[in-house]
Image: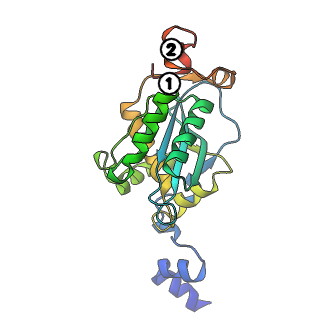
Amino acid sequence: TSYLKELHANNPRFFAMQYENEPTPDRDADFQDEWIRLYQKLPQGKFRVGIVADPSTGLSTGDPCGIVIVAEHEQTDDWYLLHSESSRYTTDQLCLRVIELWKRFRPCDVAVEYNGTQASVKLALERMRKEHKLAMRVRYPVRESYMGKEARIAALAGKFEFGKVFLRPKDTELRSQLRYWPNWPHDDLLDALSFFQVLKKTRNVGSYTLEDRNRPRPNPTVADIVTGKVKKQWHGWL
């Protein structure tokens, strides 16, 4: 009707929320729908893989824990999301999950966002890593040291706009966080993805082919790598 058209023209934000059940109207969205690209199969080539975990702020309230695993193509610098999950973990559960994903994906970089309230995660993960003698080096970027969250997430918009980020069809929660930022209830996956940019600036050198990633291999210890039992290219940060 003419009334609805006039309302949409005069107040698109109110119209989107009240009549379209959309928290963010299209022209206000930082990440447009057409920028979100999906992939079915990874291209050939070498990739630099990183895991980033954003610990939860509480077991019952606040943001859940967000974990993303990104493969960056060595030649094109395109990002391909290999894994994403948003769950509420205790400190030990999160650490065990990070170790499990590290064994599965063999990333070049592992980062767990760190601030004062999440110091227990760093202590627990370092304890487990040493107890199991895992050759896994973890970075703990301090949130306040790498711009604010809003600035980091805003910096992702250009990469999405120019078609440099590819998600899987199953990454529905991350797609919702992108589409409705900053009005979605949680932003844990988006926050974790924004920290992958930080790893790019300070990352350890290393990459591997898809064949290397899919090849069965043992769980290495520091001794295995020092004695040469495990090839270095499987652990690009060495």
Q: Which residue ends up furthest to the front in the rendered image? A: 131
Check disc 1 and report the residue beneath it: 133
Residue 18: % across, % down: 55, 83
Relative to 115, say whether 237 is above or below.
Answer: above
**Dot 1 lies on which element?**
loop
User: Which residue reaches farthest left?
Assistant: 145
Callout 1, which amino acid? Lys
Alpha carbon of mark 1 to alpha carbon of mark 2: how far? 8 Å
Can residue 223 be seen by looking at this rendering? Answer: yes
Q: Quadrant of residue 68?
A: top right
Q: Residue at x 47, y 55 (%)?
A: 56
Residue 112 in view here = no
Residue drawn at x 49%, y 29% is 131
The residue that appears at 51% across and 42% down in the rendered structure is 95
Q: Position of residue 187 (x, y in %)?
A: 48, 59
Q: Quadrant of residue 86?
A: bottom right
Place residue 233 in its image quadrant.
Answer: top right
Quadrant in which the C terminus appears: top left
The residue nearer to you, when weighing 233 against 151, is 233
Say how many tags the image has.
Answer: 2
Location of residue 134 in the rendering, given as x and y in whole percent from the top left corner: 51, 26
* Quadrant that contains the N terminus: bottom right
- Tell me, for residue 223, which label it has, or none: 2
For marks 1 and 2 on the same chain, the one whose residue lies earlier in the sequence: 1
Q: Nearer the viewer, residue 98 or 80?
A: 98
Going by the numbered disc 2, the residue's amino acid type is: Ala
Q: Is residue 46 above or below residue 183?
A: above
